[in-house]
Image (spheres, grey):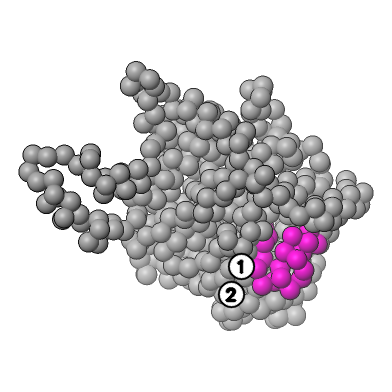
């Protein structure tokens, strides 16, 4: 029997914290346009090269470097929709993108998981993806789903099996990470089964897909071929650039952001030229190079470069996928695990990102611990409550209740107290007490909450005929691609 699903609880706020001025945003855009026109991007997809060449871009056939005239870029970018819907398997969890609302997901692409039964740290499997999908279905802080960990037990078709694991355990929207034209075609076929048909998928896309550019200034064949398949089917495409300052990008923030923006814009232009009005999402998640070793650093002290990209995407008139969480701490529950990510949900909410990749991984986005997502969810709830409007009404001002109690009295016996106290603020994991009134270890409490949800929460199952259809599609994909 399916459990009752709590409604999603996105961050909603009327507050906004600008990270860039209008002059700075114009300067970044001008630099991106100059890079596209004068430096160009290397395009690995033959389909994309043909689209760009036919539109009037300058294509070097020998190097596959394409220079995009500013007029071409601006015209194509003008057709990107500012907002759109992301459908869910359960329509109650559809997402309407709009101002002042940020929807969070789990983190993505982890390669290892800590087994909840044995405590063993091992390569992640499809069963881990199914497990975290069931947890995400139960958590109101998770509005949509990423493939948090890889289904490494399925090789070349891992990404398709991750979709299957999620759709059988989650009623919310799914954002996949499919690469390759053939793989994308299978994913679209699966999504149409879940949505109920091709037109239903186009109207309420139960699937979106994330592709990445390759820094510096490259559009990968597999990513772009997949993106074109999805755009044709009406499936929204999130385009993420991941520059590393000092190695694959300039060491200056402005240079790295301008170059990354050029990559995202180039990919968006291809999709808009092929399918004007195709829903696209702008995303830049930068990293840093350690000046002593060149090693990747995910969380330096200065995180402004994480939130500025939200405004860059909005300056183009695009919705954005912002970044948060993903601590470098090897285990959850440490000072480092909270310190590195504690401000993330607050600041990305103030920046106004419509979508946010976030909770559930440790060791620099690589390992999933059962308790980790619950600890991250508490940080999320602290930010969500901090950014809420204060409810000021006759009921909440409680003048009559104060009058009834009077000076020197107490409010414990009031019906008003019984009505409101339980919902005045959520009880935090860090405030859990034992029988003697001592604070308990938050990691142990988080693990208990995981165990409770995993044992007792059961999502609404996918219809049997749809389960069978997905199994049949996966069998064909495995036979062709593995």
Q: Position of residue 192 (x, y in %)?
A: 77, 64
Residue highlighted by disc 1: 280
Secondary structure of residue under mark 2: loop
**Residue at horizontal 63 percent and vertical 59 percent from the top:** 90
- Measuring from the top left, give residue 442's x and y in whole percent: 44, 28
Across and down, in percent, residue 174 comes to: 65, 55
Disc nearer the start of the sequence (1/2) = 2
Where, quadrant-wise, is the N terminus in this rendering?
A: top right
CB within 8 Å, label 1 to label 2: yes
Which stretch did the figure color magenta? 188-214
Q: Label 2 crowding class (10 Å Cα cut-off): few <14, some 14-19, many 20+? A: many
Residue 80: give its label: 2
Q: Is residue 435 visible?
A: yes
Tell me if residue 309 can be seen.
no
Q: Quadrant of residue 15?
A: bottom left
Q: Residue furthest right?
A: 479
At mark 1, the secondary structure is: strand
Mark 1: give few (<14), some (14-19) or many (20+) Cα within 10 Å. Answer: many
**Front-most of 449 and 33?**
449
State whether residue 411 is above or below residue 236.
Answer: above
Task: Please state the total of marks drawn on the protein image.
Answer: 2
């Amino acid at each position: 029997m399916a459990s009752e699903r709590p409604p999603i609880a996105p961050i909603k706020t009327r507050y906004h914290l600008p990270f860039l001025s209008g002059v700075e945003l114009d300067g970044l855009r001008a630099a991106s346009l100059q890079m596209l026109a004068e430096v160009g991007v290397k395009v690995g997809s033959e389909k994309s090269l043909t689209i760009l060449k036919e539109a009037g871009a300058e294509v070097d056939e020998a190097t596959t470097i394409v220079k995009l005239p500013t007029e071409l870029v601006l015209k194509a970018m003008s057709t990107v929709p500012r907002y759109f819907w992301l459908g869910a398997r359960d329509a109650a969890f559809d997402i309407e993108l709009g101002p002042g609302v940020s929807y969070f997901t789990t983190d993505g692409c982890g390669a290892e998981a800590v087994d909840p039964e044995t405590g063993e740290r091992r390569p992640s499997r499809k069963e881990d993806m199914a497990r975290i999908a069931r947890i995400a279905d139960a958590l109101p802080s998770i509005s949509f789903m990423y493939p948090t960990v890889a289904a490494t037990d399925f090789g070349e078709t891992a990404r398709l099996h991750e979709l299957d694991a999620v759709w059988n355990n989650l009623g919310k929207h799914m954002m996949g990470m499919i690469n390759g034209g053939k793989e994308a075609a299978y994913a679209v076929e699966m999504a149409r089964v879940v949505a109920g048909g091709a037109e239903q998928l186009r109207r309420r896309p139960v699937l979106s897909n994330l592709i990445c550019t390759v820094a510096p200034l490259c559009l990968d064949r597999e990513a772009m071929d997949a993106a074109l398949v999805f755009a044709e089917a009406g499936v929204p495409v999130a385009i993420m650039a991941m520059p590393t300052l000092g190695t694959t990008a300039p060491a200056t923030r402005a240079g790295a952001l301008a170059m990354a923006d050029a990559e995202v814009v180039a990919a968006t232009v291809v999709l808009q030229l092929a399918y004007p009005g195709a829903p696209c999402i702008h995303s830049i998640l930068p990293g840093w190079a350690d000046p002593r070793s060149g090693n990747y650093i995910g969380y330096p002290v200065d995180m402004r470069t994480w939130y500025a990209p939200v405004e860059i995407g909005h300056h183009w008139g695009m919705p954005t996928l912002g970044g948060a969480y993903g601590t470098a701490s090897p285990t959850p529950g440490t000072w480092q695990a909270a310190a590195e990510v504690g401000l993330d949900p607050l600041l990305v909410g103030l920046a106004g990102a419509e979508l946010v990749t976030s909770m559930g991984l440790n060791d620099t986005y690589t390992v999933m611990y059962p308790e980790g997502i619950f600890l991250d969810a508490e940080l999320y709830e602290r930010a969500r409550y901090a950014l809420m409007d204060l409810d000021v009404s006759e009921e909440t001002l409680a003048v009559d209740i104060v009058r009834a109690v009077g000076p020197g009295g107490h409010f414990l016996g009031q019906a008003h107290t019984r009505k409101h106290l339980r919902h005045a603020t959520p009880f935090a994991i860090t405030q859990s007490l034992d029988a003697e009134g001592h604070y308990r270890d938050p990691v142990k409490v988080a693990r208990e909450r995981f165990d409770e949800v995993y044992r007792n929460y059961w999502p609404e199952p996918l219809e049997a005929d749809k389960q069978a259809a997905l199994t049949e599609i996966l069998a064909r994909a495995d036979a062709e691609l593995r």
